Every structure is written in structure tokens, then in C-alpha cells.
Image (cartoon, coloured by chain):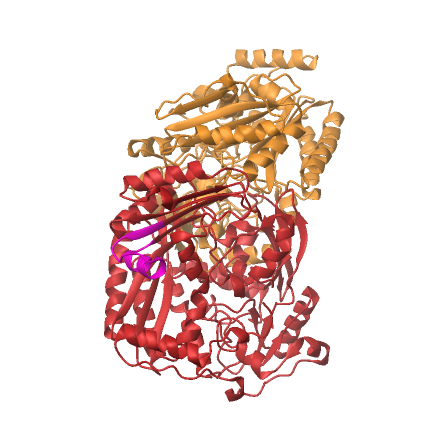
Chain colours: A orange, B red
Amino acid sequence: MTGRRSFWAWGLEAEEPTNEQRQQAAARLAARYGVPVEAPPVPRIEQVQLRPPRIAPPEALAEICTTDTHERAAHHYGKSFRDIVRAFRCEFPNPPDVVAFPRTEAEVVAVLEWCAQVNAAAVPYGGGSSVVGGVEPPAGDRPVVSIDLRELNRVLEVDPVSRAARIQAGVLGPALEEQLRPHGLTLRHFPQSFEWSSLGGWIATRSGGHYATNHTHIDDFVESVRMVTPKGVWESRRLPGSGAGPSPDRLVIGSEGTLGIITEAWMRLQARPRFRASAGMLFPTWEAGYEAARRVVQAKLWPANCRLLDPAEAEAAAGGDGVHALLILGFESAEVPQGPYLQEAVRIARECGGEVDAAGIRIADGTDDADAGRQGAVGAWRNAFIRAPYQRNLTAGTGVVGDTFETAITWDRWPEFDRVIREHVGAAIAAASGGSLTCRFTHVYPDGPAPYYTFQVLGKPGGELETWAAIKQAASDAVIAGGGTITHHHAVGRDHMPWYRQQRPPLFAEALRAVKAALDPQGLLNPGILVD
Amino acid sequence: MTGRRSFWAWGLEAEEPTNEQRQQAAARLAARYGVPVEAPPVPRIEQVQLRPPRIAPPEALAEICTTDTHERAAHHYGKSFRDIVRAFRCEFPNPPDVVAFPRTEAEVVAVLEWCAQVNAAAVPYGGGSSVVGGVEPPAGDRPVVSIDLRELNRVLEVDPVSRAARIQAGVLGPALEEQLRPHGLTLRHFPQSFEWSSLGGWIATRSGGHYATNHTHIDDFVESVRMVTPKGVWESRRLPGSGAGPSPDRLVIGSEGTLGIITEAWMRLQARPRFRASAGMLFPTWEAGYEAARRVVQAKLWPANCRLLDPAEAEAAAGGDGVHALLILGFESAEVPQGPYLQEAVRIARECGGEVDAAGIRIADGTDDADAGRQGAVGAWRNAFIRAPYQRNLTAGTGVVGDTFETAITWDRWPEFDRVIREHVGAAIAAASGGSLTCRFTHVYPDGPAPYYTFQVLGKPGGELETWAAIKQAASDAVIAGGGTITHHHAVGRDHMPWYRQQRPPLFAEALRAVKAALDPQGLLNPGILVD
């Protein structure tokens, strides 16, 4: 897929919805909510007026920098609900002054040096899919350079024996997998943002990926990392494991562009799976479903997929009856037939009341184009998963407010946590004229689930951001009060800072501030994120 | 096992060898090396003269502090080869001035406050089993307080649903497992130092444990941690997973007592295994063995045990023929029969030339006292493993120099790395009159092994430390030059600092220095370790 990115929508300009498609979506919403819904016409870049750039790139960098309106607008926001609403409205009050596209690490260094000279804030930009305000410039008088790493998009070196590769940080998911495929290897990191997120972004935000159990976050796949900081280049050794002091990599992972710009990493890879087994199991209640998920993960069968959908979510995403919860189990391997593993998981899940008939169990061994896990309930869910971000393009500006929030919590606190979340967020939704709140587990750990909530309400057109803010506040307050994390895999960004401040140990905040001062004394990198 | 710790030997005073036992050991050495070997008599605490304490505890702390000679001598060193030689010789030039035994976290705070008042260095002490100079006081005029956490030895809270427990950091391995057993749970962290190492020590040093694959280090079992620092208490949330900024826990894990004193942690636990399967497989060559280990771990069968012994090690530890390498495979689970997993691993290993007959495959399903994995080659190796630290008590002062060093390296570099290590360390051993150098994999990762080398030479009695230093230098230089880590799970301590300085990214050193300055501005905690 090539072409120019949309300046407001998820994906390419060529993929923007037509006004007719948006009107059809509005009609569906009207039918659902029983009120008239209008879909305003899609915005055009010609409508966008930006503040003139406050700085101009030096001649040496002119070739890789732009002040083009489209690029500045496209780099103003990530892709959260709030971002798309604001971009759809052509509200771009605080765009980056310059967008830079360094083609080499040396050019990354040069851009950062220029930022230091003019005291500009430097905002690293990978795929631009942040849903937490992670690529949005800080407000204020300081000029801002958005540093888009898309040109650093190559797999530099492949080590097939260790199953690892040295990869440039700006590569997007599809281009990465395309380069690994000839080697029979895959990173298998498939966040929902896969199409429009980068390796460096995944590392900087502790992205959660394909694997629902065991090694869920990108963290575990980083073998070493290389990062440009204002004080020089940071590079760790390639090591399968180490016990030499606190892990240097774990300080980079999750640093959200505040300590440096990740330029490349050695990543641990997988052989491409040839054996697959999957099942979609129905449970009489949500409670029975999460008991099954708990027992399967505690048995350490380590399914690649162990995603539990509550009854409402199962209905919406996979054609469920609105009563039963759905547990999607998937196993995969390059070397080992997976049927027996699946059968064990099914056995455990049945003990919790799960049901699946023979047709619901798919085992495909030894073929590259195995269709197990790509059809039926599993397939329906997967398609919905990948397409979901495009949905917002259809409904922006209609008054629909829809978003997700995700967390993690230990099993002992989970049932009450879920009850309180639904109570508080439900109240905020009710106050906003009503709507839906559903939940699934995206990842499951032996000590607790990572629940992922989705809400949708139809608010007043033009009032979407206020409605969103009220619900987001209720959700975030409840998550933090209940002992959860403000984010399991969406990162902190600007949006989660108020709750991150409550969550982190205060002394860790001081430690991180000290690290920031040591590496970035001028405070160039993403000021206001993570470090106050 | 109760009683007073030996002031020089591994274990309790009551377990010290008799002079007769040591003479028998000397005779065995003499037979092996073909030269006379003498075993000097074991030292007695009455022979020990210590520098008078340079500080006295304040009255409020008198009850939990001691300046007793035995305790000060016992807290002077860890339990490295070098430590036991020095202690055996009653060389205690730089003992802690006071040993404190806080019984509560409040007393830990009080002791640290006192250290701040008198500007004493504070050395946290868990089980005292460091083999890298991790509990040894810094040299110099500054007074030193060794803070022994043995009284913080309780499991405070058990969460059976999440399989987790809140545990005080000073608990030693056996006492921890004893308290977990009634709950049907186990941490299953069994480093070789298990009897004489503590939870807090494991966390502070990134200890490597029972599991040879997947989650090998204590790191992955830490759900949250609580640490007393000079600036206050640091405590993270109990979370199964999180993506909120860099992990606070990962900065504590491996901090080796330089940032604070870990007082308790929520740890992820296991249900006690009921299903076991194991096999000891012979390979015609070392190379065939490590190819099998690589393929088994890359197949992600995640055996609990996947330890490969080179031919010499297999001979010494498990009665091998000196030609074949031995791969010990072990699977265990609380919920799932393990036979099929083992069979898959055996199938893969056979493709690499591995051999095992039916009797060598042990499968014991569904009983608590399953004997699989406790007999045969597996059992012989395990017994030798747990008893190994006591061996040094027998040979201290005889001129024998024996030690181990461990690292990790990616598979692509491993064969050449092993060759170079054996060449350089072998040369140092030859220069010291000759001896043995053997290797095993203690842990195996998809991207590389963690090789663990053992050497022994018979040097000049009285010259042990110089002989040791020459070999250690050759080994450490070769490890770092070859791209390995200076330690996979023994930590850095004082002994590894010269090579840790070469290994860590220089900017990470600056970051850690900044963190240290923020949390411990007076530099009270373990000065000279990790941070220059």
C-alpha cells in the first residue's frame, strides 16, 4: 500500500471514506440509537490553515525537512478518538513547525543537534498511530520539530541461527514482515496498529502484540537497542540474557521518546508457524469464561491466542447470542504439532463450563497456508480486529464517541474491579445519553488478565470531546483507584499523564527525571511526557 | 537447619568439615594431580583479630546491632573462591564495623538513618552467598554497617487465586518454600545458593534459577517490589503486566543494593508440580549437543530443565564416558501431563544425534512424590549441583584453585566464542601448572545459550589468590572481547566492575549514576558497586 497518508483519518488518503459511505454509516447509527444522525462531509487539506512555521531548517537539512501544510497537519496528532475528531474538524492549533525525515542515523543526530541549537522540542514520530497523545507537540512558544523515522525502514542484518535481526526503527509492520519473509522468519508482533506503527514506536511504548500469553509485550523480544540521545549514542550488547546490573534495555523500552530516538534494534524472531490449532469456546457466563482463561494460562500451555470476549463483545465482534462469552484459543508453532496443546486447553476450559463441538476445533498441521484460526469465530474476530481503526473514519463528526481503554489487574481483584469499572464508566455513559460498554481480555497472565474495554455513545455533534473527556476521566479514575495500570499497552503519552503521576512510585519519578537530565539536559525530547 | 553460620565456610558451623575429612580430600587431590597435597587445619574464630569497630550503634539500635567478632568476620565476605580462601586464612582486614539485624522495615529505615548520620557505608546482606564481592565492605576510612535482613523472613500474604505472595526480602530459600508449601505453592527458584540466599538478594542480583528456559531469571517473577531508600520508600503496584513508562521494577532488579534495601516483594508463584517427565540424552559430540539444545529451545517447548554438559563435565558430574555430551531434559507441570512434551523434545534431539533408551525416559504423572527427574543421570547431576558449594570447604588452603564463570552469547557467535574462551582460559590454566576447564549450559534461550564454565587447577599453597586472579582475568577479558556478558546470573559486585565498565553502554552508566544521586545522594549504599 503506497501513497500519501490521510491528514485526518486512519490510513492513506486513498482509503478515506467517501461521503456516501459516511452517510450509510450515519444511517446505521441512526437506526441503532433511534435518533437522526448526520455525517458532515470529509475535510480537505485546502481548508486547513496552520500557524506559520516559527523556525526554518538550516540549509544542510533542507532536503530532509518540510513545512508543507499536509505534512505538518498529518504530524500534529496521533490516531486517538480525540485526535481524529480534532483533525476532522481541521483544528490544528499547535502543529509542528517542521517535519524532518532523516534517512540515516547521522541525519537523526544532525536534526537533534539543530533542535538543540534553536532549542526546539523534538518529537520522535514512528507510524503516528499513538492513541495517547504520544506524538502531539507540547503546547507553548517553543518551536517543535516532528522527526519522522519512516526512511529508516530496512532490515539490516539477519542471523538465522539465533533467529534474530538488526532492524531500523522506522520500519512499519507490513514492510518489516515483508523483509523477514524470505528468511522464513517473522517478528509476529501484530498490534491493532500493525499497518501504521513502527518497530521503534513499539519499543518506545512497550507495545503489546500478537501473543496473548507468555511474552506479550515487545519488551521480551528486544535483544539489544540503539538510541540517539542529545549526549551521544546509546547501544547495548546483543545478549540472550544477562544479570549485569539493571537492564539498560528496560530503561529504553517504554521511554516514549523522552530519553532519545531509537534508531535500530536487534530483535528476537520466530520461525514462521506451520502448525496451528484453534478453537472458539462458548461459556454460559462472563464469569465462567474468565475462570477458564485463568486456568488455561496458569497451566502454562502458553497459547498464542487466549482472548476472551464478554457476551456483548462476542455478539458484536463474532456474531454471538449476547448471552455467552467467547474464548478464542489459538496455538501455533514452526516445529511442533499443536493439536495436543489445544486439546489440553479445551479440556481445562470445559471443566469451567466451556462448550465447543468438533467443528469448532480446527487443527492444521504442517502447511504454510493453514487455514485453522483464519475462519469461523476466530477469523471473524481477527478481521474485525484489523479493520477496527478504519471504523472511526466513517463516524468522525457524527456525534459518536467511541474509545477503548485497557489495563491489567491481578485475578484476586479482577471481579470487583470489573464491577466497579462498569459501574463508574456506565454512569458516565448514562450521563452522556447512554451507550455500550464491553470488555475483552487481550492478554492473559498467570497472575491476572489485561482487560480491554470498549465504549460507544452517541453524543451531541460538536460536543464529542467533552463527552469523551467525561467518560475517559471516569474510566481512568476507576482504573487507578482499583489498583490497575493506566495502560497495559497503549502507553502514557500526554493523555495519561494525570493518572501515570498517581501510579508510578514517586521515587521512580525522581529517578526518571534524573535520567532525563543526564541524557537530555536541555529537555529537547518530548517535553511533558513521562517526566514532569 | 539451625545454628550459627560458619565464619569462613559455606553453611553452618556444624557443617564445617573436620580436619580428617579435609585430609581425605587432600589425598584425593594428590592422587589426581600426582603431587603431595596438604590440608591445613580449619581456622577457629579465636584466631581472628579484627580492627576495632570505628563506630558504635546508638542506644536505640543497640538491641539489633552487634560488634561481635564472629558476626563481623562472617559478614566480611561472600562465598566466592577468593572469599573462602581469605576467610580460611583469617584475613579480615576490612570487616564491617557493626552488623545490624533489623526486625522490621521501620528498623531498616532507622539503621539507614543512622548510617546517614555517621556517614557510614551501608551494605545490604541477604544470605551472604555472593560470589562476586557483593557483600564485601568498600575499602577506606569510611565506617561500614552490614545490614543483615535475616529477621525479615516471613511470607506476609498469599493470594492463591493469582498465585502470588507478598514476601519479606530476607527470607532464605528453604524457609520460603516451607511457608509456601501448605498453600500448595512454590516460587521454584532454586539457584545453587538456594540454602543460603534470600529473596531480596535474588532480586537485587537478577538471580537465575530453576527454569532453564523461558522465565529463567527472578526478574520475570517479580510482580511488585518495595525498597527502602535514603529518600524514602519506593513501592510499585502489583500488576500482571504494564506498559506505563519504563518498568520501575526493572530498575530495582539488578540494582545490587546500590539504590535501596529491598524489604518485600509480591512474587509470582507456581502450583506444585504433579506431572514430570525427564530424560538424559547422550550426544556423540559437544557440537551435536548444543545443536540439540538450540533446536529444542527454539521449538519453544519450554522445558524446566534443558541443561547440557560437555563431555568432561558429563563425566565428572554424571558418570559419563568423557566422550559424549549429556543433555538433561526435564518437564514439569501442576496441571498437564508432560510425557508428550518430553517426547517432542526427544524427537528433536534425536534428529541431532541424541540417544536415549526407554529406560532413560522417565514419566511420572499425577503424583506429588514423582521420582522422575530425581534419579539416574538427572538425579546425579542435581545432587552434585546442590552439594557443590560445600566442596570448597574441603579444599580451601590446599593450593587448589577452582571457580566458575558464566555468561550468555547468541548462537551465531557461540562456537567461536567457546573456542576462544577455552584457548585463553586454557592458556592461563596451563601457565598455572595445568588443570581442567569444563562447560555446561545452565540456561538456554531461543537466541543463545548461557554457558557456565568451571575450572580447577592445583597451584602453590599460599599462591591461590594470584593464580585465581590470572585465570579470572583471562576469562573475563575473553568473555567481554567475545561479546558476552560479564555475568549471566552471578551479578557484578566488586569483582566484575572492571569488565562491567566495558560492557554497559557508557550513557547507561551516566543514567544509573544520576538515579543513584537522586535516591542516595550521600552515597551510603554499597559505594563502589555498579556506579563508579
Highlighted range, magenta: B309-327
On the image, which quarter does residue B362 sit in? top left
**Foreground residue, A311 or B425?**
B425
Q: How many marks?
A: 0
Q: Nearer the viewer, residue B491 or A292?
A: A292
Residue A157 visible in image: no
Above or below residue B33? Residue B305 is above
| Residue B524 versus residue B451 in the image, above or below | below
- Residue A348 magenta-highlighted: no
Q: Nearer the viewer, residue B445 or B515?
A: B445
- Residue B324 among those drawn in magenta: yes
Which quarter of the rendered picture does the N terminus of chain B lie within? bottom right
Q: Residue at x 57, y 83 (%)?
A: B69
Judge whether B83 appears above or below B258 on screen.
Answer: below
Q: Position of residue A58 (x, y in %)?
A: 38, 45
Q: Position of residue A509 (x, y in %)?
A: 60, 54
Direction front: furthest residue:
B359
In the image, is B201 to the left or to the right of A467? left
Residue for point 45% across, 64% down: B387
Q: Which percent across, then down, holds residue B478?
A: 29, 63
Residue sitting at 53 percent across and 86 percent down? B50
Question: Residue A20, percent across and down?
Answer: 53, 11
**Residue B162 seen:** yes
Q: Residue at x 68, y 26 (%)?
A: A463
